[in-house]
Amino acid sequence: MHIHYFQHVPFEGLGCIETWSQEKGHTLTYTRFYENGAIPSVDEYDWLIIMGGPMGVDDEEHFAWLKAEKKAIKEAIKHKKKILGICLGSQLIASVLGAKVYSNKEKEIGWFNITVNPESYALFGDREDRFPVFHWHGDTFELPEGAQLLASSDACKNQGYLVDQRIIGLQFHFEVTEESLESMVQNGKNELLEKGPYIQPAPTLLAKANLVFENNRKMYAVLDYLVNS
């Protein structure tokens, strides 16, 4: 299987998704927009994965490539590719599907619990209904038409969605590894200085790195779900 991914900034890469892909023997290619990377034809890949980033879905004035990226996502949806969006990626998919993306009432940065919709247990690999995941976002989205809500948190109602059993958007970061966690903290120091009920300081974020393993296990479950969907 050929997986192509869109990466927006150097410090938000595939994380454990890369390990899963290598273990399964899948081909990985990428478009790194911060390197002016080219977008392949939709016929050249089987899956599309869209990673996170600090920009917003409507920041085309500052990030001109967003327009081309949205067009590519629309093409992938039209051609019935399997698609996974994480954080900004989930917002971009939602926007392309006609849903509103807007500033959440509170920024959510840190390890906070999500509550899983019981209909989504199979996607996450078990029947655990509440557990901590890693968040780093200020925006949120309305659910695309026909989407199934996957999970919610105290700070943000719409934490994930499933469309047509083949398109998944996750607002949070199951994929984060200890290394990528440190990189995100290093590159987001200014945001961590902001005050808010759902913003944890850097030492707290890093001290909870023991939660990475379980988050990665659930990321694998999501990827396996897409394989079998």
Image (cartoon, rainbow, N blue to C red):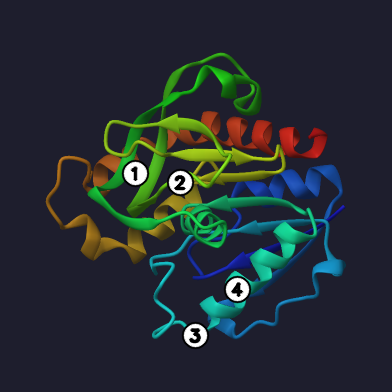
Say which of marks 1 and 2 sits in front. 2
| Mark 4 residue type | Glu
Q: Identify the residue shown where x is 39% and y is 31%.
A: 152
Q: Are dots 3 and 4 in contact, CB under 8 Å?
A: no
Query: Where is 2 relative to 59, above or below?
Result: above
Cα separation between marks 2 and 3: 23 Å
Looking at the picture, tell me which residue is in the foreground, 1 or 62. Answer: 62
The amino acid marked with disc number 2 is: Gln
Residue assigned mark 3:
64
Residue 182 image position (x, y, % from top left): 40, 54
Residue 171 has which mark?
2
Q: Which residue is mark 4?
A: 69
Task: Give the number of the disc on residue 92.
Answer: none
Task: Relative to 32, say whether 178 is above or below.
Answer: above
Assign a secondary structure to mark 4.
helix
Q: Nearer the viewer, mark 1 or mark 3?
A: 3
Bin the neighbour count of mark 1 within 10 Å (Cα to Cα): few under 14, some 14-19, many 20 and up.
Answer: some
Q: Position of 104 compared to 90: left or right?
A: left
SS label for mark 3: loop
| Residue 41 x/y as whole percent | 80, 75
N-term-proximal mark, 3 vs 4: 3
Q: Residue at x 51, y 70 (%)?
A: 10
| 25 on left or right of 126 | right
Badge 2 marks a residue whose secondary structure is loop
Q: Residue at x 51, y 58 (%)?
A: 98
Residue at image mark 1: 206
Q: Earlier in the sequence, mark 4 or mark 2?
A: 4
Mark 2 or mark 3, which has the lower sequence index? 3
| Label 2 crowd bin: few (<14), some (14–19), many (20+), radius 10 Å | many
Residue 229 placed where, x, y %? 79, 35
